[in-house]
Amino acid sequence: MKLIESILTKNPCYTAGRRITVKGLMLHSVGCPQPSAQVFVRNWNKASYDRACVHAFIDGNDGTIYQTLPWNHRGWHCGASGNNTHIGVEMCEPGCIRYTGGATFTCSDKATAQAVAKRTYQAAVELFAMLCQKFDLDPLGDGVIVSHKEGCKRGIASNHGDPEHLWTQLGLPYTMDTFRKAVKAAMGGGAAAPGGVSGTKIMGAAVATAEQMKAYIKAKNPKVAQSVLDMVPLYLSEGAAEGVRGDIAFAQSCLETGNFGFAGSAVTLDQNNFCGMGITANGLKGNSFSTAQLGIRAQVQHLKAYASTEPLKGECIDPRFKYVARGCAEVVEWLGQKENPQGKGWATGAGYGEKIIAILKAILATAGGTAVPFKVRVTATDLNIRTGPGTDTAKTGRFTGAGVFTITEVKSGPGSAKGWGRLKSGAGWISLDYAQKI
Ligand SMILES: [Zn+2]
């Protein structure tokens, strides 16, 4: 989370100087096509701007949060009594939409608009998690986290439809309920993952190597077919082709096929279906693919359907792609319907995602991982150093600063797709998502 303090000291709301006891947080979106938070900061920081004042703006282009009032300052964000109790945060909106009346708009570039709305949503999750911790608020408590629209229904805000109007019209799977749950999840991890939801993101570069995956499967299933060992690298190449973590796909296959032993499995090895695809009821045999590569490709495409709203890069060969609610499971933990905030997902059994995570961790713990030591370049000046490999460990309070650093150990852990690297200096661990291997 990138937070810049940019207090609107000239705005009459600031100079009025009233304080509140923070009881809740209200989410807004600006209601006009302007992705730049700095434009609002500039225009609102004037003595003549006496119409409104909020606590923060979230930039649509890069997700940076500009804090524009002290958090316990009374804002002018919702036009009613909510100003006395709630912090107000505005998400900027895509530049490619045009309002045609009220909360209705047209959009000339849906992919860009979705990316902006997703970015601000995720940054808002991180900010709200931080504020809930700061003010000891329960994100799922009644009336604690509300949208402007919900505030109106509760009689504490004026009649606006933001920000739900944005998500609905852009076809995003977000609601205030998914938002509150994501805030709760982000708090559970001690800190939010870069994506705004806590967990292991399915999209990204694989962390495990082909050698680790082969060593893992040989240990679990000594009789594993040579053809299975030969196809392991395909998980990495097919995953990379779509931006999906191939090691996660492989871990899922280990779960679905009983470590490629197919004992008690509905599918057989010659079906080239390594993910139980098409077995929508007991007794069904599921889909078949002509080669192992195509079977793995279909699985990777199906994972992308769940994990992302981006289009496929290759031709769609996943026969079930069209049945997936796109982007409903950004993290492995949400692949199981029981754990998914929307009740959607790949499998119905409890703890499905956790089982895949357990396998992934075991794979990463086998020998043959990233060769250490290696050097990385960090360009961010505010990259946190943590006491352990994950956002669930404490921050040391120190930052790397920009420069070149030596990594002596790599471990997987929450909050970083590429894993965590131990600094040679002994200062702690950094997320390799923000470091370039050199
Ligand atoms: Zn609003």
Image (tube, rainbow, N blue to C red):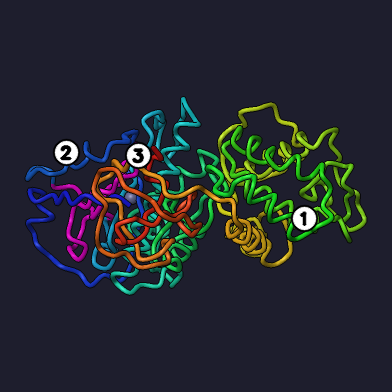
As drawn, 316 above or below 154 = above
Q: Circle 3 — which element?
A: loop
Which x, y percent locates residue 384?
Answer: 30, 56
As rendered, which of 124 and 421 lies closer to the eye? 421
Q: Is residue 377 magenta?
A: no
Q: Circle 1 — which element?
A: helix
Amino acid type at mark 2: Asn
Q: Which residue is mark 3?
A: 60
**Magenta residues, start to end:** 50-78
As rendered, which of 225 and 11 lies closer to the eye? 225
**Is disc 3 in contact with disc 2, using a CB cutoff of under 8 Å?**
no
User: Quick check: 434 left or right of 204?
Assistant: left
As rendered, which of 188 and 23 lies closer to the eye? 188
Q: Foreground mark, 1 or 3?
A: 1
Q: CA distance from mark 3 to mark 2?
A: 17 Å
Amino acid type at mark 1: Glu
Question: How busy is the neighbourhood of tag 3: few (under 14 within 10 Å), some, or many (20 plus)?
Answer: many
What mark, if any, has residue 256 been given in the picture? 1
Q: Is residue 62 magenta?
A: yes
What mark, if any, has residue 339 been given in the picture? none
Amino acid type at mark 3: Gly
